[in-house]
């Protein structure tokens, strides 16, 4: 099984929270930061990784993503506060080799 992640991206003012799921977190964050695809994160400049959870399978990650998306912003903020109370970009310092 390949490790998968649920993750949150936000913009520089932390006014938007995007919830996503991926089987390659490093590559997906790179895509968000470089606006590879036109969509929500590109439109709202969501380029900071502020939260993530790891799972043993993509199926587990998708179940968790759906659970999180059903919740409100306050619940998402609580998860971020637990892991990253300063809302720092958790991908700072990562080396990206994707194009």
Image (cartoon, rainbow, N blue to C red):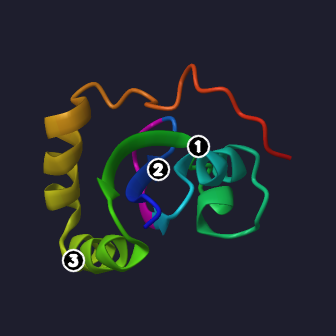
Disc on the earlier residue, 3 or 2? 2
Disc on the earlier residue, 3 or 1? 1
The mark total stands at 3
Q: Secondary structure at mark 1?
A: loop
Q: Is residue 18 magenta?
A: yes
Residue shown at 42% from the left, 58% from the top: 3
Q: Is residue 20 above or below residue 24?
A: below
Q: Is residue 55 left or right of residue 47?
A: left
Q: Secondary structure at mark 2?
A: strand
Q: Is residue 20 above or below residue 47?
A: below
**Disc 2 residue crowd, few under 14, some 14–19, many 20+, Cα 10 Å:** many
Q: Is residue 97 left or right of residue 47?
A: right
Residue shown at 53% from the left, 51% from the top: 25
Q: Is residue 29 above or below residue 94?
A: below
Nearest the eye: 64 or 35: 64
* Image position, residue 49 (x, y; %): 46, 41
**Disc 3 residue crowd, few under 14, some 14–19, many 20+, Cα 10 Å:** few
Nearest the eye: 39 or 56: 56
Q: Which mark is residue 67?
A: 3
| Marks 3 & 1, CB-CB < 8 Å contact | no
Q: Which residue has dot 1 on it?
A: 47
Nearest the eye: 15 or 59: 59
Q: Which residue has dot 2 on it?
A: 9
Residue shown at 60% from the left, 59% from the top: 41
In magenta, the rendered stretch is 13-20
Q: CA distance from mark 2 to mark 1?
A: 6 Å
**Disc 1 residue crowd, few under 14, some 14–19, many 20+, Cα 10 Å:** many
* Image position, residue 23 (x, y; %): 52, 63
Single out the mark in the foreground, 3 or 2.
3
* Image position, residue 12 (x, y; %): 51, 35
* Image position, residue 20 (x, y; %): 45, 65
């Amino acid at each position: 099984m390949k490790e998968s992640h649920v993750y949150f991206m936000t913009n520089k003012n932390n006014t938007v929270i995007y919830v996503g799921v991926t089987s390659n977190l490093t590559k997906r964050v790179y895509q968000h930061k470089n606006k590879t695809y036109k969509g929500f994160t590109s439109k709202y400049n969501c380029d900071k990784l502020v939260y993530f959870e790891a799972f043993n399978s993509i199926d587990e990650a998708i179940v968790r993503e759906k659970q999180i998306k059903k919740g409100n912003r306050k619940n998402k903020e609580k998860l971020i506060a637990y892991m990253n109370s300063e809302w720092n970009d958790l991908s700072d310092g990562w080396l990206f080799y994707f194009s």
